Image (cartoon, rainbow, N blue to C red):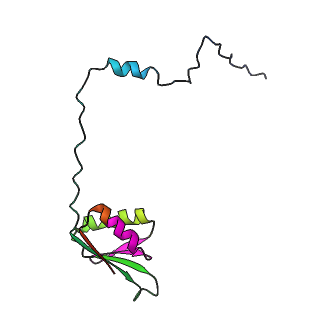
Amino acid sequence: MSKKKAPAPTAQEPLKLDAPFAGLAALRDALPAQERREPAPVKGPKAPPRAVVRYERKGRGGKEATVIEQLTLSPRERAEWLLGLKQALGCGGTLEDEALVLQGDQRARVRAWLEARGVGRISVG
């Protein structure tokens, strides 16, 4: 069986794949002008005024852990912060009572992350 090839485009016919969105500018200009609205600022929970970050090995079978305490957050907010920390730092972690516990020595990185979130005073030990 022989396959028929599509004819090559001539110089007078532009390829349709060259500018697939070329006609959109004309359509956009035909639309009525509207006010440009800026998005409303996202109002998240207020950052806690204080956090204590410490390094711990006792009672963990020799494993290193970074413990973040004294965050005055609701249980839901604590879970959200823990998820954000784990994703940002690429480590595991869990909630223990009122504290966030991350695997490994993450003190410097946690401090930077908390500062970016707006925590007022951060004590690292």
Left or right position of 64 against 47? right
Residue 122: quarter of image: bottom left
Residue 116 in the image, given as x and y percentages of width and height? 32, 61
Q: Nearer the viewer, residue 51 or 77?
A: 51
Vertical position of residue 36 compared to residue 48: above or below: above
Question: What are the residue bounds of the magenta stretch?
Answer: 92-114
Residue 106 in the image, given as x and y percentages of width and height? 41, 73
Residue reaching furthest to the right: 1
Q: Residue at x 34, y 19 (%)?
A: 29
Q: Residue at x 20, y 61 (%)?
A: 46
Residue 124 in the image, given as x and y percentages of width and height? 33, 77
| Tally of numbered tags | 0
Left or right position of 61 against 28? right
Residue 23: quarter of image: top left
Instruction: Specify the quadrant that holds the N terminus.
Output: top right
40 is within the stretch colored magenta? no
Residue 69: quarter of image: bottom left
Q: Residue at x 39, y 72 (%)?
A: 108
Q: Nearer the viewer, residue 7 or 104?
A: 104
Q: Nearer the viewer, residue 120 or 97?
A: 120
Vertical position of residue 59 compared to residue 79: above or below: below
Instruction: Specify the quadrant that holds the C terminus.
Output: bottom left
101 is within the stretch colored magenta? yes
Left or right position of 42 against 60? left
